[in-house]
Image: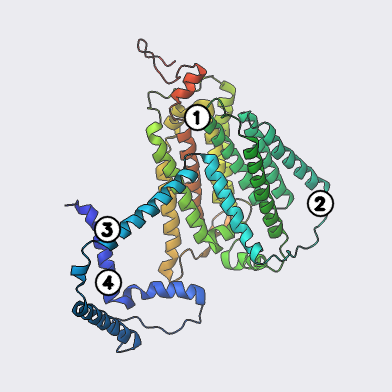
Amino acid sequence: EPPRFMKVPVEILVVVCVAVGIAPAITVAPVLHAAASSILGPAMPAYSLSIWHGFNTPLMMSIAGVIGGIALYFGLRRLIDLHAVVTHAIGRNLFHKQLDLVFGLAHRLTQALANGSLQRMLMALVVVAIVVALAPFVADPGSPNWPSPQPLPLLGWTLWAVMMACAVSALFVYRQRLLAVLVMGGVGLMVSLTFVFLSAPDLALTQLLVEMVTLVLMLLGMNYLPTQSAAEHSRWRKRRDALIAVIGGAGLAAAAYTAMTLPPNTMAGELVARALPEAYGQNVVNVILVDFRGFDTFGEITVFGIAALVVHAMLRRSRMAPEQIMPGPPIKLPVPADLAQIMFPLTLTVSIFLFLRGHNAPGGGFIAGLVLAVPLLIQYVIQGTTSVESRFGFDYIRCIGAGLLIAIVSGSASMLFGVPFLTSGHLDLHIPLIGEVPLASAIGFDTGVYLVVFGGAMLILSMMGTIKPSRTRNARKGEIDPTRRSAKTGEMH
C-alpha cells in the first residue's frame, strides 16, 4: 500500500475530473473564456457548457457506435469461436516485439548522439537548428528584400574590426584557456560598446554585466577541467566542424541583419507611443519587460531560478565541508580587500539607484541585480567564502523564493480589481519636502526580478567556488589536495 501522500496527487486529479464532468460551466468556462478571448478578441462565438445538450447528432453517433460494437462482437461469436482458433497470444507477442525493436532503435540512437560527449551533442543541436532555419527558404527560395544599408562611421568600423580580431584570435589561442576566455570576453565587450554606439544603453549595461559574471563563471569552471587537452582530431573532422560553424554563423548573421533592417512600420512605434500613457514609464525597454511582456519575464525569472536550484542540487554533494574551506584567500591582499569593502556599499547604492530609476531611465531589476552581484563576487575571490558568508549571511535559495513570491503577489494584486494578471497601476504620492513622487505598481514585480537575478547568479557562482578539487586533476599535476588537513597538526595544507 503506497503512503498517503502518494495518493494525494491521484485524488486531486480524480476530483478535478469529476468536477469538470459535473459542473463544466463553473470549472472550465472561465479558463476557456480567458484563453479564447485572448486569441479571438471581442468576436467570441456563442457556446454552452453543460452535461446535457439534448438528443443531437454527436449523441446519436455515440449511441450508434456503442450498439454497433456490441452487435459486431456477439455476431462474430456466432460465426467463429475466436477463443478456440486463437490459441496463442499473437497480438501480445507482436506488440512486445515491435516495442523491443523501437527501444533498441532508441538505445542505438541515444548511444550515437548522447554518449556523454558535449561536442557531439552541441554539433547535433547546431545542425538541427540550421536545418530548421533553412526549411522556410527551401519551400520559398525568394530573395530577401533588404533595404540599402546606411554608411558606417569610423567608430563603427573600429568596433567591428576589434570584435572580429578577438573572435578570430580565439581560434589560435584555444589551448591557452585563460587567454582564450579573456579574448572571448573582448568580443562581449565590443558587443556592449556596439549597443552604446547604437543608442541602446539598457542592452549595453546588461551585456557588460553578463560578460563579467560569465567570465568569472568560466574561470571557476576551468578549475575542474582536465589539465591536458584531448588528442588532436582528424583533419576531416576539423573540416566538418568548420563547415558547420561557418553555416551556423552565416545564418545567425543573416538573421541579425534581417532583424536590424526591418522596415520602420513595425509594432515598435506603437510600444513607444503607449509606454508613458498606459504603463507610466519612459524607458520603453523596461516597460516591455515588466508590463507589456511581463508574463514572459515572469517565465524567464522562473526558469532562471529553477536553473540555479538545479545547479545547487547537483553540486551540493560535491561541496566542501565548512571545516575544509580555507578561512581566507591563499594569498593575503590587504589593499584589494580594503578596496572591495569600500566598493560594496557604493555599488549597493548604485544598484538601488539603477533599480529605482529603471522605469523611466536605463536600469531596472535585472541590471540592478547583476550590479549587486559583481562586487560581492569580487569579495568572494579576494576574501574567501567563509569570510564573506559569515559577514553577510545571504541565503540565496530563500532570496530566489522571495523574489518569485513577490513577483506572483504583485502580479496577482491586479486581479483583485477585476483586471488581468500583471496589469499595471499608477499612483502619484505627495511626500513632504520632496514633492510629487510617481509610483507604478510594476516596481513590485521588478523587485521580484531584482531578487531572483541576484540570488540565482550568486547561488551558482558560490557553489562553483566551493566544489571539492578533482583528485585526478591534482594527481596528474603532482599536487597535494589543498583542502586536506594534516593528520598530526590538523593544519590546512
Disc 4 marks a residue whose amino acid type is Ala
**Above or below 400: residue 220:** above
Q: Could you say which quadrant of the image residue 437 lies in? A: bottom right
- On the image, the x and y values in percent for residue 474 come to 48, 21
From this viewpoint, is residue 440 visible?
no
**Quadrant (top left/top right/bottom left/bottom right) for the C terminus:** top left
Residue on which disc 1 sits? 224
Q: Earlier in the sequence, mark 2 or mark 4?
A: 4
Which numbered marker is on residue 19? Answer: 4
Kindly identify the amino acid type of the residue bearing the numbered disc 3: Pro
Q: Secondary structure at mark 3?
A: helix
Is there CB contact under 8 Å for labels 1 and 3?
A: no
According to the image, label 3 marks what residue?
Answer: 9
Which residue corresponds to the image point at 44% horizontal and 46% vertical from the top-left?
108
Percent x, y of residue 415: 42, 67
Hey, which quadrant is residue 322 in on the image? top left
How far apart are the two marked residues, 3 and 4, measured between alpha carbons? 15 Å
Q: CA distance from mark 3 to mark 2?
A: 61 Å
Which residue is tagged 2? 152
Mark 2: which amino acid?
Leu
Name the residue at 28% across, 67% down: 16
- What kind of element bears circle 4? helix
Disc 1 residue type?
Answer: Tyr
> Where is residue 88 shown, x and y percent of the image?
23, 61
